[in-house]
Image (cartoon, helix red, strand yellow):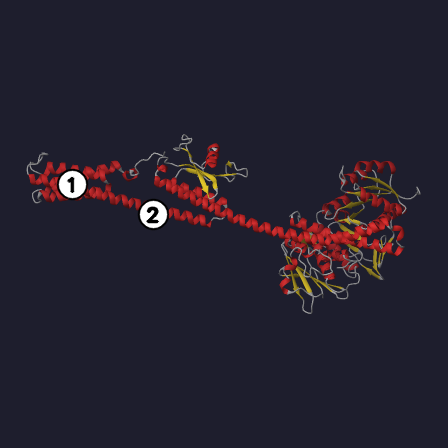
Amino acid sequence: MPRLVPCNHHLDKHTYGARFWGIAIPLVLTSIDWPFREILTPSNILMFYLLGVFFVALRFGLLPSILASLTSAAAFAFFFAPPIFSLAIAEPENLAGLTVMLVVGAVTSNLAENVRRQAYVAEQRERRASALYSFSKELAEARWEKEIIEIGVRHIHAEFGGQNTLLFPDQNGLVCYPKEPPLDISLQGTDLGVARWVFNHGQMAGHGASTIPNEAAIYAPLMGSTGTIGVLALEPVDLVRIFLPEQRRLLDTYVNQIVHTLERAKSAEQAKDATLKMQAETLRNSLLSSISHDLRNPLATIVGAASTLETDEKRLDEDRRRKLVTVISEEAQRMSELTVKILDMARLEAGEVVLNRQWYAPEEIVGSALRRLDKKLKTRQVNILMADNLALIHVDAVLLQQVVVNLLDNADKYSSAGLPIDISVETTPLGLSIAVADRGPGIPESLQQKVFDKFFRVNAESAQSGVGLGLSICRAIVEAHGGKIQATNRSGGGTLFQLYLPILKCPPTVNLEEKELTP
Amino acid sequence: MNPTNPLLLLIEDDPQFQMLLSTTLESQDYQVLSHATGLEGLIAARNRQPNLLILDLGLPDIDGQEVIRQLRKWSEVPIIVLSARNQESEITQALDNGADDYLTKPFSTAVLMSRIKALLRRVARLPSGALEVFQAGELKIELTRRRVFVGEQEVSLTPIEFNLLCVLVRHAGFVVTHRQLLEKVWGPSYIEHSHYLRIYMGQLRHKLEVNPARPRYLLTEAGVGYRLYEGEN
């Protein structure tokens, strides 16, 4: 059991000084009264002494005021009550007055002491209340476990002094030292064995407790709603005071506040995790349904056609055989394109892609993209509007070319063969702008943001093959370059995809030759 | 199989893909020798002296780059490297190490055939000495007289533009890496100054191409280098 000691020792901080004043003040009064001893009656003088005792009681407490009473009594008997210069008192009237003064002095001393004590307690309460208030206010604003622990350690230090630390279990449920670097006020070198015992038993241990009382620190369990969640190790300056009921209650209040805040933070985190998990799940589902649809169909065709060729080759005429072979080749091509897109997206998402930025001419990026789609765009009218004197731009050309290829591919897919595709490249205040526009059906305004989402297709059931990744890849690449991409409707019908790449660096200078070869 | 037909050495570790390529190549009257590892491939290259090598860069034993470096110490045999997509840096390295051309998987066998033919043709042409006149489509370059024509129209080029064009003509039909071009035209100290190449290639396109944004002759291989169109043959 914790030892109980009276808690008033703090009231007698100035004990020796106070006792000195308890004796000095009656002596001072004596010297003041002495010249007037002919004018004042003994009862008047006693009143002066009473005033002094009262003052000492208010100012310095009980013991000094008793000293003051006794000194006053002695001084009165010696100097003022006849016979003078003797402690004897001749007149019974003076004896009665002296007795009354002693009694009144004792009573007022007690009263004054009570007033003093109450004022002190009130002041302490107020200080504690405001400390608790600022503690809970800080906790209310804390979001992360680390923050909460730091606030807890700091405030317990401020209230109880000394050093303390909060210990929590790791994934294996074993209490371990904190991973964060300790604060100046953190208690270091705690006994993990004791902390683990406290954690497992939910009981206090360490100094003054029944378990391991020889420890310098106190180990208190942090009791949460579902059991012990951690351990407080505290080595206060004053090991005795901490066991006062009032202090224990205060410590409990601090610990409870910390525990509640930690539990609140944890449940908020769990809720967030759950939401994220759900989103990932939804994504995985849409990925699976999308992939299974878009890969299974061509696969079914390929496997079917190949097995027909394998088993019935002799019975097929040349024409049919050719048809089957063409189907296999086309479907395999489609699967290959889809796989490439899925892999690209996975690579971009995984953050594996490191931009290989070099100086490139915008014209060249558009040119190489067009060349990759040469076959597809053979019969399509492609208008290219390239601003004059475009500066070199510091980008990853392979990825950026992929963006232009995807945009052109989309424009080709979603507009009829006879309609033109317009490409324009220019420098704008937002950076280099590359725009690809078609004369297709356009995208409803409400979906113009959504088209860049993964696996989103404006018309999921349309005959166009695709997984809805092309534009997501575009956005990922453009954003990796610090740029942005948007879709809008064109006047006159069709969609305009426009991307802006910020110009982060001025292109290096090139010393050009003036002279040309003379033919 | 006719022993005078060109011998192709195929180094590819995927058995199905190896089978596909050797079957296709044999059907085109090439002799094909297949190996699944780099070391076996190097030994076969020394013993059998193939006319052309097709090398997959991802091999189980040694790095494909190492095979190229070893081979180039003593052999000029044309090398086509096969690589996965998104590996431009690896392709560039292979070309800088001495490979002649590349294809990314998956590719159509028709493209492979035309690349093989082009490389074998170049080897056959080499002993006959330097090329006098290069012609592809409308573009005509008289190398010794340093004159360039597009159709009937003569085009005047700066010395650097002409040198750049000459390097591409010497490798017409094949990809030349940025590094190779910078080194051959500007010198070894310019290897990191790729912006020079971009600027001059742009100028050259504006002089030679009808539509510089959709070039016909000076083709870009994104992330790797440039290829001069060789004409339809």
Which chain does the numbered disc 1 sit on?
A: A
Secondary structure category for the residue under label 1: helix
The quarter of the picture where residue B231 lies is bottom right
Mark 2 touching mark 1, by CB under 8 A?
no
Label 2: how many residues lie within 10 Å, few (<14), some (14-19) or many (20+)? few
Looking at the rendered structure, which numbered label has been put on residue A77? Answer: none
Left or right of A167? Residue A445 is: right
Left or right of A341? Residue A259 is: left
Left or right of A349? Residue A22 is: left
Identity of the residue furthest to the top in this view: A214
* Residue A477 place in picture, x, y as percent: 66, 53
Mark 1 residue type: Val
N-term mark: 2 or 1: 1
* Residue B26 place in picture, x, y as percent: 88, 45
Q: Is residue A132 above or below residue A91?
A: below
Q: Which residue is mark 1?
A: A103
Q: Which residue is mark 2?
A: A126
The quarter of the picture where residue A492 lies is bottom right
Mark 2–mark 1 distance (CA, rounded to whole Å)? 35 Å
Secondary structure category for the residue under label 2: helix
Q: Quadrant of the N terminus of chain A?
A: top left
Q: Quadrant of the C terminus of chain A?
A: bottom right
Compare residues A518 and B157 and report the one nearer the observer. Answer: B157
Look at the image and tell me whether residue A129 can be seen. Answer: yes
Mark 2 residue type: Glu
* Residue B7 place in picture, x, y as percent: 88, 42
